Amino acid sequence: MYRVMQAEIARVSRYGGNLSLIMFDYDNFKSINDTHGHEAGDLILQYGTSLLLEVLRQEDTFGRWGARSSCSSSLVTAGRGVFAAQKG
């Protein structure tokens, strides 16, 4: 994910345009893993990912950022990213 962000920053710096980085944080993710096991945490991540995949465009990038017990997800997008995040 870090390399994707570097490449997108370089692209926007060179050609102009807009870039958005949206980070999602799963509240109480560590507690869910500790209480219900990593399998339950994995199901939550899979469900959240499936929801995002329904609205992502081909040029958007989505990836995981963080350890197994503490998780954030990042979306790097050109153009409408901030609008889409506020709209949701």
Image (cartoon, rainbow, N blue to C red):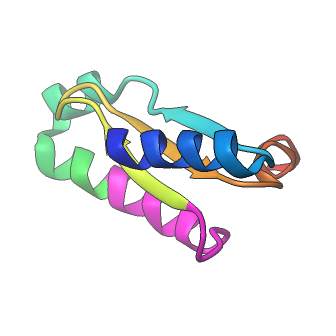
Up/down of 73 relative to 53, above or below: above
Residue 14 against residue 66 in the figure, above or below = below
Asked if the magenta segment contains residue 40, the reply would be: no
Question: Quadrant of the image for the N terminus?
Answer: top left
Q: Is 20 situated left or right of 2 in this image?
A: right
The spot of residue 57 in percent (x, y) is: 65, 73
Q: In this view, does 42 lie above or below 67?
A: below
| Residue at horizontal 47 percent and vertical 68 percent from the top | 50
Residue range (magenta)? 44-60
Q: Residue at position x 78%, y 45% from top?
A: 18
Q: Is 54 or 6 nearer to us in this picture?
A: 6
Which of the 4 quarters of the picture holds residue 37?
top left
Q: Does the magenta stretch include residue 56?
A: yes
Residue 84 rendering spot, x and y as whole percentages: 81, 52
Q: Is residue 3 found left or right of 13 in the rendered image?
A: left
Residue situated in front as seen by the camera: 25 or 61: 61
Taking the spot 61% from the left edge, 37% from the top edge, the residue there is: 21
Residue 73 quadrant: top left
- Residue at 17% across, 38% down: 36
